[in-house]
Image (cartoon, rainbow, N blue to C red):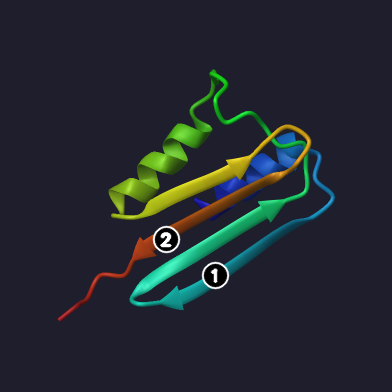
Amino acid sequence: MTKEIINNAVKYSDAQSISTKVTLQDSKLNFEVKDDGAGFDLTAKRSGNGLKNIRYRIEELGGILQIESSPGKGSSFFYSIPLLRTT
């Protein structure tokens, strides 16, 4: 998912910088990907499947996704994936 988000930022956002942060907290991997690019309207209809696929993959892993973006303001993706215990 991180690769897809960064790929989309490089291809579509015209960003000058993209940052990533990964932390481990309470048995969850927490991801943050931000860019200072063009941003986009979260309420607009999209013809592609990129965001839908990202959301689906995160949810399939039991995670949650939060996206913040608006035209001209860049984009931020926050998502958390629980780690499964192995015995």
Q: Residue at x 25, y 70 (%)?
A: 84
**Along the polypeptide, which appears first: circle 2 or circle 1?**
1
Q: Position of residue 1 (x, y in %)?
A: 49, 50
Q: Residue at x 31, y 70 (%)?
A: 83
Q: Three-letter amino acid code at disc 1?
A: Val
**Residue for badge 2:** 80
What is the number of the mark on residue 22?
A: 1
| Residue sitting nearer the eye, 5 or 44 | 44
Q: Three-letter amino acid code at disc 2?
A: Ser
Q: Secondary structure at mark 1?
A: strand
- Label 2: few (<14), some (14–19) or many (≥20) C-alpha neighbours in 10 Å: many
Q: Position of residue 66 (x, y in %)?
A: 48, 48
Viewport quadrant of the C terminus = bottom left
* Residue reaching furthest to the right: 16
Which corner quadrant of the image does residue 44 belong to?
top right
Q: Residue at x 59, y 44 (%)?
A: 68
Q: Is residue 35 above or below residue 26?
A: above
Q: Secondary structure at mark 2?
A: strand
Q: Residue at x 78, y 35 (%)?
A: 72
* Residue reaching furthest to the bottom: 87
Marks 2 and 1 close (CB-CB < 8 Å): no
Q: Is residue 19 left or right of residue 87?
A: right
| Residue sitting nearer the eye, 25 or 20 | 25
Q: Position of residue 26 (x, y in %)?
A: 35, 77
